[in-house]
Image (cartoon, rainbow, N blue to C red):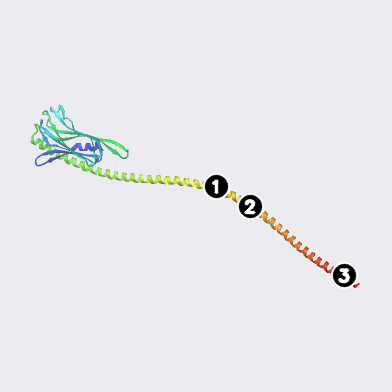
Amino acid sequence: MVLVTALLLSLASCVYVAAEEEVVWQYEGDYDGEIEVGVSAPVQADPGDEITVTVEGEAKEDLEGVTMDIWVEGSAEEGAERWKSDEKSVLSYDDLADGDDFDEEFEFEIPETADPGMMLGHITCEWDIWDEDLEDYVTHSFDIAFPMTYLLGAITEAEFEKLQEDYAELQAVYTEAVSERDKWKTDYNSLRSDYDSLIATFEGLNSSYQSLQTDYKSLQADYSQLSSNYDDLETRFSSLESEHKSLLAEYDALESDYEATARELSNYTTYTYALVVATVIFLVTTIIFAVRRPKIVASR
């Protein structure tokens, strides 16, 4: 994403601004929504001039160890050579919190031998940012060159106006490209939002699944314990049922013996009563005969 953004911005990212007292080139870049950078410089100069370049920007996330360097360069000796200024340090391993901004000015001297034409600005930047998915810091960077100050030299005013017209056409193309990029970016953000929503839903469902899995295992353990207890109770019940049947059989046998014994005792009781009655009758008869016998003898 950084490379795509850098390439788009490098094509036509300078805005020609005509102010009342000064004219400047402005360059602006936004890298993955993590850091914004803007560069301002004079729109035109002559070889041998010293120009002031302003670099400003703002962190859009919490960034650590941010380093940023800027320099300018161009051609010399009718394109036979290249010249490059010293590198200026904008940031040097600085930590930036979300919303922190920076604003620095640098002086660059243009060689006397510099060719007329567009001069280039060059920025490199590197930083570390926390990645929630990886749970670690990752390094992001960009390295971008962009057109800035135009060296007049032997160019005529008419040629310069023609360059301005050409630039206006390029700016229109760039604006259309930026509009198209913004549309794709909007679509991307929408898809990213849907993706994040799906991820959140998945994580919620996964958490619920893990919880249900834990509950299931717990219930499975309880079921196994209850099943084991049921088997023990069933075995105990079978044993008690067998003992119950044995006791019923013994009870039936005892009941049968009791009824037989009761019948015998009933018969013995009847016989005893009969014997008692017979004995009483016999005794009464004997007593009667004993009493009456002396009378009989006396009468004789």
Judge depth for marks 3 and 2 and give the one in front. Answer: 3
Check if mark 3's residue and mark 2's residue have beta carbons within 8 Å.
no
Label 3 vs label 2: CA separation?
A: 70 Å
The residue wearing badge 3 is: 294
The residue wearing badge 1 is: 232
Please state the horizontal and vertical placement of residue 248, each as a whole percent of the image: 64, 53
Characterize the local packing of mark 2: few (<14), some (14-19) or many (20 or more) Cα atoms within 10 angstroms: few
Q: Amino acid at mark 1?
A: Asp
Q: Which mark is residue 247?
A: 2
Q: Amino acid at mark 2?
A: Leu
Check if mark 3's residue and mark 1's residue have beta carbons within 8 Å.
no
| Image position of 251 (left or right of 149) | right
Which of the 4 quarters of the picture holds residue 267?
bottom right
Please state the horizontal and vertical placement of residue 4, each as a whole percent of the image: 24, 37
| Image position of 178 (left or right of 243) | left
- Of the image marks 3 and 2, the number of the one nearer the N terminus: 2
